[in-house]
């Protein structure tokens, strides 16, 4: 294991969000219902239900926590199917969000909880920040909301022409992630992958403060 501290990422099977931290000398724990698509010697992936899982008390507290609760039953892009899914799907989705919130707040570390534009604004509260992947170098759009706390620093969006700063924003030449993925079995997983540019920007904004 690396020695820079532990980064925790919930409802995260790909590990894209923790990769910049691992490369900088941190260790990572990811938790998800599905197995990880690949292994890394500095990443421990735990297959578990986040509503039942608890952070191991014998480990040092994480230096930062990320959470990506599934959006299938919450995102407004799927609102046309809400009635057919019934209350059970909504209740379970909110239980997962609440488990992520509790784990984040209990950690005492900076944290962010991510979801696309969703009904969380109705059932919980308005997000603290929104962004599109093109704001941080990935050339597509997918409006994404963040609920943050514990001193989490949102990376700045820097546009071409801003003085004294290297631009991070690019044109979304690949269009919309919501509209452009075909309806395949892994569509939800593909659409939920963390934009690498955003993951790197979060690392740069927060690594020196945790």
Image: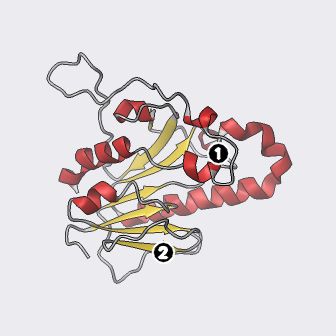
- Which residue ends up furthest to the left in the rendered image? 164
Drawn side of residue 83 relative to residue 112, left or right: right
Residue drawn at (24%, 16%), measured in percent from left and top? Answer: 161
The residue under label 1 is 123
User: With respect to residue 59, does 119 lie above or below?
Assistant: above
Label 1: element kind: helix
Q: Quadrant of the C terminus?
A: bottom left
Quarter of image, res 64? bottom left
Structural crowding at the residue carrying mark 1, measured as other residues with C-alpha within 10 Å and reported as few (<14), some (14–19) or many (≥20): few
Expressed as whole percent of the image width and height from the top left, the position of residue 57 reads 38, 81
Crowd around label 2: few <14 · some 14–19 · many ≥20 (10 Å): some
Give the camera-side residue of 2 and 60: 2
Q: Name, please, the residue furthest toward the top.
A: 161
- First of labels 1, 2 by sequence position: 2
* Residue that appears at 28% across and 50% down: 203
Distance (Cα) linking label 1 and label 2: 29 Å
Q: Secondary structure at mark 2?
A: strand
In the picture provided, is 27 more to the left or to the right than 195? Answer: left
Residue 89 horizontal/vertical position (percent): 75, 56
Q: Residue 46 placed where, x, y %?
A: 48, 74
**Which image quarter: residue 79?**
top right
> Looking at the image, which residue sits at the far bottom?
58
Residue 142 percent location from the top left of the image: 52, 34
Residue 23 marker: none
158 vs 50, left or right, is left
| Residue located 46% across and 59% down the image | 14
Above-or-below relation of 45 to 9: below
Query: To which residue does mark 2 refer?
Result: 46
């Amino acid at each position: 294991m690396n020695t820079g501290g532990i980064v925790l990422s919930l409802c995260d099977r790909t590990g894209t969000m923790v990769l910049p931290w691992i490369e900088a000398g941190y260790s990572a724990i990811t938790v998800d219902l599905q197995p990880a698509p690949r292994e890394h010697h500095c990443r421990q992936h735990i297959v578990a239900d986040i509503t039942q899982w608890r952070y191991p008390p014998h480990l040092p507290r994480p230096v930062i926590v990320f959470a990506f609760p599934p959006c299938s039953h919450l995102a407004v892009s799927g609102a046309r199917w809400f009635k057919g899914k019934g209350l059970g799907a909504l209740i379970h989705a909110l239980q997962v969000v609440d488990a992520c919130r509790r784990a984040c707040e209990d950690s005492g570390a900076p944290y962010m909880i991510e979801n696309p534009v969703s009904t969380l604004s109705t059932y919980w509260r308005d997000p603290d920040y929104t962004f599109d992947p093109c704001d941080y170098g990935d050339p597509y759009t997918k409006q994404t909301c963040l609920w943050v706390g514990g001193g989490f620093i949102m990376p700045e969006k820097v546009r071409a022409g801003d003085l004294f700063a290297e631009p991070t924003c690019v044109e979304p030449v690949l269009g919309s992630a919501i509209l452009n993925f075909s309806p395949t079995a892994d569509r939800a997983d593909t659409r939920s992958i963390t934009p690498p540019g955003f993951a790197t920007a979060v690392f740069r904004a927060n690594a020196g403060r945790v």
